[in-house]
Every structure is written in C-alpha cells, then in structure tokens.
Image (tube, rainbow, N blue to C red):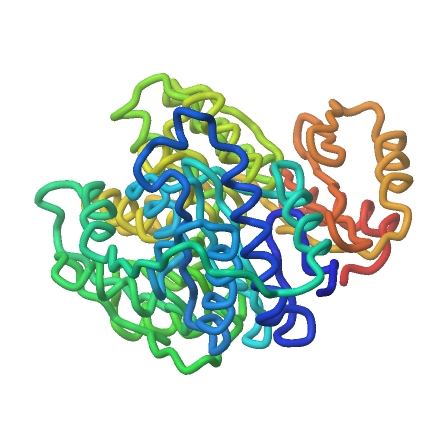
Amino acid sequence: MDPAIFKAYDIRGVYPDQINEEGAWKIGYATAQFLRSLLSGYQRGQANSQSLCVGRDMRTHSKALANALIEGMNATGANVIDIGMIDTPQMYFAINHLGTCGGVQVTASHNPAKYNGFKISGLGARPVGIDTGLQDVEHIAMALLHTKGNADGSVEKYDLTADYKNHVLKFAAPNIRKLKVAIDASNGMAGKMVPAVFGDFPVEIVPLNFEHDGTFKHEPNPLVEENLAEVKLAVKEKSCDFGVCFDGDADRLMMIDEIGNTIGCDLMTALMVPYFLEVEPKSTIVYDLRSSLVVSEEIIENGGTPRRERVGHAFMKKALRDSHAVFGGELSGHFYYRNNYYADSGLITLVHVLNIVSNAKVPVSKLIKPLRRYHSSGELNFQVDDKQGMMDKLAKKYGDGQIDHLDGVTIRYKDWWFNCRPSNTEPLLRLNVEADKKKLLEEKLSEIAEQLGKPV
C-alpha cells in the first residue's frame, strides 16, 4: 500500500496501482479499530455505537473496495451497516441518524474515473483528517502484514433514501413557487440523489449527465470553468431560473444565474447571509479566508458575527461547532449547516437556494449584482519549492499592510488584499487577490506573480 494515498483530509489514489482491495481491507481494519477506541464506557452501551456505516459512490471499482473495507472492519469484531450507493452528505446523516461511531464513504470526489478513495468520519460525523486521527489510521494500516482474520462482525444493508429525503426537504419553505432549474450531475452521485429527493418537489429539473457508467463526460469538478459549459448553455436555451453543477460525490456545487454567468461560491455565501440571519438573528457565520470582503460586510450589515477560518472542511466544521454558527460557506463550494450536524450538503444547499430564489422579486442576476462590488483573481497556483521562504519574503515586502498568518500569509490594504497559502501535499503556493477596482487588481496580481513565477 502506497503511503502517498494518505492526504490531509482523506485517502485517495489511482486504482488499482495505489488503492486496491488489499489496501481497502487494511484501511477498514484500521478505521474500525481507531474509531471504536475513542468511545467512552457510556457510549459503548448505546445501540449501534460500536457499528460503522459504509457507503460508496458510482465508480466502477467502488463496490469491490467497499466490500473489502467491510471485511476488514468485520475482522476487528465491528458490525457494519452498508448503506449502499449514496452521495457523501448522506454518510453524515446516516452516522447521526443511526447512532454509529463513524463511517467511511468510498469515493474520489471530483477526481478522474481512475481514482478512488475513502472519506472517514467519526462520532457525530466529525471529520477524520491528518490532525484528527488519519495518521493513526495510516500507522495501523501500514503495520498490518496480511488481510486475513475471522469476520466476527456482522453486516446489515440499509436503504436510508426515504429518511434522507425527509431530512433534506425539511429545510424547504412552505408554498415554494415552482422554479425551473438546470442541474448538471457530472455523471456523479447527484444523478441518483436529485431524482430520489426532488422527484415530487415543485421544481422543474432540466437534467444533464445523470447517467452512471463509470466515466465522466466532463471532469466532475465544478470549480473548473470549462466544466460549466453544458449547464450554462442549458440555462439559456431552456430559459431556466438558474442552474447548478455538482461535483462527483455531490457534497459541492456551483451556481449559474439565468443569464449564464458563474456565481462564485463566496458570493453564494453572501447571498445566503440575510436569509439565515433573518431566522437566527445575531448568529455567527463562518467563511474561509479566501472569500471576498463582501461576505464579512454582508454579515456585519445584517447583524451577524463574521468568523474567518482556515481553508478545509476539517477547520470549517470545527469552527462551526466551536462558535455554534448557523451556517458556513467555503470558496470550494462546500456549505455547512448547524442543523445538518455542522456538516456540508450539496442537496440542502440547493433547497436553501430554491427558498431564496422562490421568495425573490427579481431574477438571480439582479440578486447577485449588488454583491459583485469587488474584483477577484480566483485561486492561482504557483510551483515554489521553498514555500515558507517565499511567504516570508512576501510578508517582508508588504510589511506596511495589515498582516496575519491564520493560513499562509494574508496582507490587507485599504483598497486591496491578498492571501498566499501553501498546498498541504505539493510544492505549490495558492494565491488569491482582490481589489476594489479591476485595474488595481491587474496591477497587484502582476506584481505578486512576478515574484512567484508562472501559474501552473
């Protein structure tokens, strides 16, 4: 088993060279041993508390990997609840709904079809990342010499579709007006879950790439602009109210307005701010530090408390729990909700957007227009071997600005700011720049890029 598959937030690699059934067995064994060891004496006595949930996406090798994973879990004596082919957010629901000590989703999210992997969650659907147990799982798995053992645990198969549908749709506003929405499932799990959840909901869906055959018509990553071409065309040709594009495991989405313009996920966060603060006045809202200044401005203007946080779902979820925040948004398209176990969900985000658009008196483009008051570069990657050295150099050069080191280095001026942060796994620095004028953005982006090199 290749140790390179253990990433900052999950386990991911190419099948079968890096990830295969033998490795899945070992990871299953290690995960069950680790998660069950965290239970208190009281928790051990609760129904299902020593069981784990296992789900999988639609990739051709996901079922075989899930079966091997389950066998490894059973070898520790753990019982497994197999919830079948699901979107990743359904795993978070299942862990809480069934009261298990955790679960694993077999998925490679937005990666190409040759990849697969494992997203591990603990009690209450808390993420298991490199700082919260994934190193322990890696250590146990890498120390195992074989994949043999008595399968002392049991396996039960559950279909949670009806319960999950009820959970997602409980966030829908009453008397929602019928909207027309183009939905690109990216040949991923939204292709199964959108019809299952919204089949009898008052929304007319224009479906794109709902089929599952193990391949992707386009890369299942909605953050890449070229992957939005189909949904943009459908929105305009079919006169839709808006469109969305999901990633492979349906925990993230991007939104398109009725004209066909991409709506950045920080602008989506800003759009939802007054909606949540009307119901939960003075609440905290969490956002990742790459987000436009418009997000914090909207939170303050609507009487909320802004909390700026490090990039990554592990940090965002912890921040939501720590501050009891009502909602959180990340530039990557993850949106998190207090009433969804502090976890992210693409389908629940769609419900909230439907509520907002249904209640609006103007089209989506007009809703977003007041939020487009800054000019942003988007995230650019630069190959830099000495990442810390370069960030120190930037901090020195721009030392007259307001500096913080929450995640990499962020430097603010009155009319522009930037964040430069390191990749966890590659020799890359990631740069985001924003300014109040387009010309200033271009000037500062060019200035910083000159020091970092050519974007990759």
Query: Is residue 337 at all visible to an observer of this figure?
Result: yes
Classify residue 292 as left or right of residue 211: right
Quadrant in which the N terminus appears: bottom right
Q: Nearer the viewer, residue 280 or 180?
A: 280
Query: Is residue 370 at all visible to an observer of this figure?
Result: no
Instruction: Tell me: residue 430, above or below residue 393.
Output: below
Q: Nearer the viewer, residue 5 or 111?
A: 5
Q: Number of marks in the image?
A: 0
User: Farthest left residue?
Assistant: 175
Within the image, what quadrant is residue 180 found in? bottom left
Instruction: Tell me: residue 275, above or below residue 8.
Output: above
Classify residue 404 as left or right of residue 77: right
Quadrant in which the C terminus appears: bottom right
Tell me which residue sits at (88%, 34%) in the image.
Answer: 392
Tell me which residue sits at (39%, 24%) in the image.
Answer: 42
Classify residue 150 as left or right of residue 88: right
The image position of residue 153, as x and y in percent, is: 42, 54
The image position of residue 433, as x and y in percent, is: 68, 43
Q: Nearer the viewer, residue 202 or 17?
A: 17
The image position of residue 419, as x and y in percent, is: 71, 38
Tell me which residue sits at (74%, 22%) in the image.
Answer: 402
The image position of residue 332, as x and y in percent, is: 53, 50
Instruction: Tell me: residue 129, above or below residue 297.
Output: below
